[in-house]
Amino acid sequence: MRTAAARLLAAAIIAQAPAAAHALEGEELDALVARPSIGLYKAYAEFKMAHYASAREIWNALAHAGVAEAWFQLGILAEDGLGEPRDPARALDLYRRGGEAGSSKAQYRLGILHLEGRLLPADLRQARYWLAVAAANGDEEAARRLSSLPKPAPVTGP
Protein backbone atom coordinates (compact mmCIF):
# COMPACT_ATOMS: atom_id res chain seq x y z
CA MET A 1 0.00 0.00 0.00
CA ARG A 2 2.80 2.36 0.88
CA THR A 3 4.46 1.75 -2.52
CA ALA A 4 1.21 2.57 -4.34
CA ALA A 5 0.90 5.83 -2.41
CA ALA A 6 4.51 6.72 -3.25
CA ARG A 7 3.87 6.05 -6.94
CA LEU A 8 0.76 8.21 -6.91
CA LEU A 9 2.64 11.03 -5.21
CA ALA A 10 5.50 10.72 -7.71
CA ALA A 11 3.05 10.78 -10.62
CA ALA A 12 1.43 13.91 -9.19
CA ILE A 13 4.79 15.64 -8.80
CA ILE A 14 5.84 14.76 -12.34
CA ALA A 15 2.45 15.76 -13.80
CA GLN A 16 2.75 19.19 -12.22
CA ALA A 17 6.22 19.74 -13.67
CA PRO A 18 6.36 21.92 -16.78
CA ALA A 19 7.53 20.32 -20.01
CA ALA A 20 10.81 22.24 -19.92
CA ALA A 21 13.36 21.74 -17.19
CA HIS A 22 13.40 24.36 -14.48
CA ALA A 23 15.32 25.04 -11.35
CA LEU A 24 13.59 23.57 -8.34
CA GLU A 25 12.52 25.90 -5.60
CA GLY A 26 13.82 25.29 -2.09
CA GLU A 27 10.58 23.87 -0.71
CA GLU A 28 10.12 21.50 -3.66
CA LEU A 29 13.69 20.24 -3.33
CA ASP A 30 13.29 19.89 0.45
CA ALA A 31 10.13 17.81 -0.10
CA LEU A 32 11.99 15.50 -2.48
CA VAL A 33 14.87 15.08 -0.04
CA ALA A 34 12.41 14.35 2.78
CA ARG A 35 11.02 11.44 0.70
CA PRO A 36 14.14 9.95 -0.94
CA SER A 37 12.27 7.30 -2.95
CA ILE A 38 10.13 10.02 -4.52
CA GLY A 39 13.21 12.20 -5.05
CA LEU A 40 15.05 9.39 -6.82
CA TYR A 41 11.99 8.71 -8.96
CA LYS A 42 11.57 12.40 -9.88
CA ALA A 43 15.28 12.77 -10.69
CA TYR A 44 15.19 9.66 -12.88
CA ALA A 45 12.15 11.03 -14.72
CA GLU A 46 14.05 14.28 -15.32
CA PHE A 47 17.05 12.24 -16.51
CA LYS A 48 14.92 10.24 -18.97
CA MET A 49 13.54 13.51 -20.39
CA ALA A 50 17.16 14.71 -20.84
CA HIS A 51 16.67 17.41 -18.19
CA TYR A 52 20.09 16.65 -16.79
CA ALA A 53 20.46 19.86 -14.78
CA SER A 54 17.22 19.15 -12.89
CA ALA A 55 18.17 15.53 -12.32
CA ARG A 56 21.62 16.60 -11.09
CA GLU A 57 20.12 19.16 -8.73
CA ILE A 58 17.87 16.54 -7.11
CA TRP A 59 20.58 13.85 -6.98
CA ASN A 60 23.05 16.33 -5.46
CA ALA A 61 20.60 17.21 -2.71
CA LEU A 62 19.83 13.54 -2.07
CA ALA A 63 23.52 12.56 -2.08
CA HIS A 64 24.36 15.22 0.47
CA ALA A 65 21.44 14.00 2.58
CA GLY A 66 23.03 10.53 2.67
CA VAL A 67 21.20 8.72 -0.16
CA ALA A 68 23.83 6.37 -1.59
CA GLU A 69 21.99 5.72 -4.86
CA ALA A 70 22.18 9.42 -5.73
CA TRP A 71 26.01 9.28 -5.78
CA PHE A 72 25.81 6.47 -8.33
CA GLN A 73 23.45 8.45 -10.56
CA LEU A 74 25.72 11.51 -10.40
CA GLY A 75 28.58 9.24 -11.47
CA ILE A 76 26.63 8.23 -14.58
CA LEU A 77 26.20 11.89 -15.54
CA ALA A 78 29.92 12.57 -15.11
CA GLU A 79 31.07 9.39 -16.84
CA ASP A 80 28.85 9.87 -19.87
CA GLY A 81 29.09 13.67 -20.03
CA LEU A 82 25.35 14.18 -19.76
CA GLY A 83 24.65 17.86 -19.21
CA GLU A 84 28.26 18.40 -18.20
CA PRO A 85 31.70 17.69 -19.67
CA ARG A 86 32.81 14.07 -19.41
CA ASP A 87 34.97 13.71 -16.32
CA PRO A 88 36.23 10.17 -15.64
CA ALA A 89 38.04 11.16 -12.42
CA ARG A 90 34.89 12.81 -11.04
CA ALA A 91 32.80 9.80 -12.09
CA LEU A 92 35.12 7.46 -10.19
CA ASP A 93 34.97 9.67 -7.11
CA LEU A 94 31.17 9.74 -7.25
CA TYR A 95 30.93 5.97 -7.73
CA ARG A 96 33.34 5.48 -4.82
CA ARG A 97 31.24 7.73 -2.58
CA GLY A 98 28.14 5.78 -3.56
CA GLY A 99 29.87 2.44 -3.04
CA GLU A 100 31.16 3.44 0.38
CA ALA A 101 27.69 4.74 1.31
CA GLY A 102 26.12 1.38 0.39
CA SER A 103 24.88 1.62 -3.22
CA SER A 104 25.20 -1.86 -4.71
CA LYS A 105 24.91 -0.29 -8.19
CA ALA A 106 27.94 1.91 -7.49
CA GLN A 107 29.80 -1.06 -6.00
CA TYR A 108 29.05 -3.18 -9.07
CA ARG A 109 30.06 -0.33 -11.41
CA LEU A 110 33.37 0.09 -9.59
CA GLY A 111 34.00 -3.64 -9.84
CA ILE A 112 33.35 -3.66 -13.58
CA LEU A 113 35.44 -0.54 -14.21
CA HIS A 114 38.37 -2.07 -12.31
CA LEU A 115 37.90 -5.38 -14.07
CA GLU A 116 37.72 -3.95 -17.58
CA GLY A 117 40.26 -1.17 -17.06
CA ARG A 118 37.91 1.61 -18.11
CA LEU A 119 38.42 5.07 -16.62
CA LEU A 120 41.40 3.67 -14.70
CA PRO A 121 43.98 0.91 -15.07
CA ALA A 122 42.65 -2.63 -14.63
CA ASP A 123 43.06 -3.92 -11.08
CA LEU A 124 41.80 -7.44 -10.45
CA ARG A 125 42.15 -7.10 -6.67
CA GLN A 126 39.94 -3.98 -6.61
CA ALA A 127 37.52 -5.56 -9.08
CA ARG A 128 37.21 -8.59 -6.84
CA TYR A 129 36.73 -6.40 -3.75
CA TRP A 130 33.95 -4.22 -5.20
CA LEU A 131 32.15 -7.13 -6.85
CA ALA A 132 32.26 -9.02 -3.53
CA VAL A 133 30.80 -6.04 -1.69
CA ALA A 134 28.03 -5.65 -4.28
CA ALA A 135 27.32 -9.39 -4.16
CA ALA A 136 27.12 -9.25 -0.37
CA ASN A 137 24.53 -6.49 -0.80
CA GLY A 138 22.38 -8.74 -2.98
CA ASP A 139 23.58 -7.94 -6.50
CA GLU A 140 23.23 -11.26 -8.34
CA GLU A 141 25.12 -10.11 -11.43
CA ALA A 142 28.04 -9.06 -9.22
CA ALA A 143 28.01 -12.53 -7.63
CA ARG A 144 27.99 -14.16 -11.07
CA ARG A 145 30.85 -11.99 -12.34
CA LEU A 146 32.82 -12.57 -9.14
CA SER A 147 32.47 -16.35 -9.42
CA SER A 148 33.82 -16.24 -12.98
CA LEU A 149 37.03 -14.44 -11.96
CA PRO A 150 40.22 -16.46 -11.57
CA LYS A 151 40.87 -17.40 -7.96
CA PRO A 152 43.55 -15.30 -6.25
CA ALA A 153 46.96 -16.90 -5.88
CA PRO A 154 47.56 -18.36 -2.42
CA VAL A 155 49.78 -16.30 -0.13
CA THR A 156 53.12 -17.97 0.43
CA GLY A 157 55.53 -17.46 3.28
CA PRO A 158 58.89 -15.69 3.09
Image (cartoon, rainbow, N blue to C red):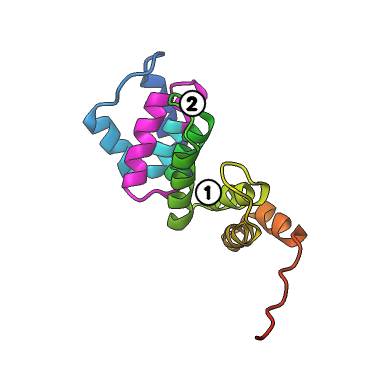
Disc 1 marks a residue whose amino acid type is: Ala
Nearest the viewer among 5 and 71 is: 71
Coordinates of residue 23 in the picture (x, y in percent): 30, 22
Tag of residue 2 = none
| Circle 1 residues within 10 Å: few <14, some 14–19, many ≥20 | many
Quadrant location, the C terminus? bottom right
Q: Residue 106 in the image: x percent, y percent?
A: 52, 48
Residue 158 to residue 43: above or below: below
Q: Secondary structure at mark 1?
A: helix
Which residue is denoted by mark 2 in the rendering? 82
Asked if residue 93 shows in the view, the reply is yes
**Residue located beneath label 1 in the image:** 106
Residue 5 is at least partly visible in this image: no
Q: Nearer the viewer, residue 92 or 62?
A: 92
Q: Quadrant of residue 94?
A: top left
The residue at 49%/30% (across/down) is 86
Q: Which residues are magenta?
A: 44-69
With 154 as the anchor, is 97 left or right in this view?
left
